[in-house]
Image (spheres, rainbow, N blue to C red):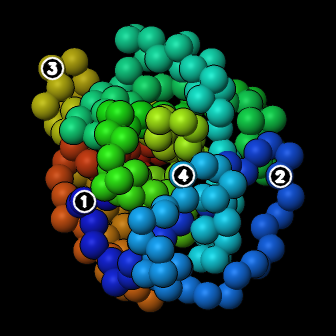
Amino acid sequence: MGNCWCGWEGSIYRVSSNAKPESPKDQSSPSEKVRKDDKKLPSNPEEVEDFRRCMSANPLTVFAFNELKSITGNFRQDFMLGGGGFGNVYKGYINSEDLQDGLLEKPTPVAVKVHDGDNSYQGHREWLAEVIFLGQLSHPNLVKLIGYCCEDEHRVLIYEYMPRGSVENNLFSRVLLPLTWSTRMKIAFGAAKGLAFLHEAEKPVIYRDFKTSNILLDQASLRKPIL
């Protein structure tokens, strides 16, 4: 979460497959909760969901770690999509019963981002802020956060899968066909719309890591800057 800035203090909520719709609970603001007890951040699915209820967040599915091992083939190396300072990202497949809304008609690929095991207070705080922050955003040009895992020392985020990879890979690949100039213009326009959405939000977000490796392409070549 170190690559984004927004005008609120991070606060934070697995919604199991059979979870009921969320209903408002505590009316105090998330920032007030953090100030009152900054040393006691939510550290299990129930506490995370309680925190999310305060922020009118989008519904997310909470996965058990064993579920993630199953959908990624126990995090097989040939399922790995990439990695970075945060950890590794794996491809997985989920079914309708895995999701809170249960709307999938067939197994759907997802990207499973496994944080690198930083169990420090700051590491958990950054992961928690990412869950809360991304759980509030919804735009055609932003990659969707589907769910998360907060179990024991495991901290994982599950995103929609972008089958065409990053713009960087498409620009410099020796295997893929070169992107046409018209396609490049469409990509730039889509990425700009995603940034404009962040900048013009009620609480504006400054995205500080905007580069070709962080712009992902779906099958229809929609441009989606990933946070």
Q: Position of residue 54 (x, y in %)?
A: 64, 77
Residue 18 visible to an observer of this rendering? yes
- According to the picture, the residue beneath numbered tag 1 turns out to be 2
For label 2, the crowd category at 10 Å Cα-Cα, with few meaning under 14, some 14 to 19 and many 20 or more, is few
The answer to the question of whether label 3 and label 4 lie on touching residues, with beta carbons closer than 8 A, is no
Q: Position of residue 80 (x, y in %)?
A: 38, 20
| Badge 1 amino acid | Gly
The answer to the question of whether label 3 and label 2 lie on touching residues, with beta carbons closer than 8 A, is no
Tag 4 secondary structure: loop
Q: Earlier in the sequence, mark 1 or mark 3?
A: 1
Q: Nearer the viewer, mark 3 or mark 4?
A: 4
Per the rendering, the mark at residue 43 is 4
Residue at the spot x=65%, y=33% of the render? 64
Per the rendering, the mark at residue 174 is 3
Q: Earlier in the sequence, mark 3 or mark 2?
A: 2
| Badge 2 amino acid | Ala
For label 1, the crowd category at 10 Å Cα-Cα, with few meaning under 14, some 14 to 19 and many 20 or more, is few
Foreground pick, 48 / 220: 48
Per the rendering, the mark at residue 19 is 2
Foreground pick, 23 / 180: 23
Foreground pick, 215 / 151: 151
Classify residue 209 by image quadrant.
bottom left
Residue at the spot x=15%, y=20% of the render? 174
Question: Does 32 appear above or below 133?
Answer: below
Question: Does 22 appear above or below 121?
Answer: below
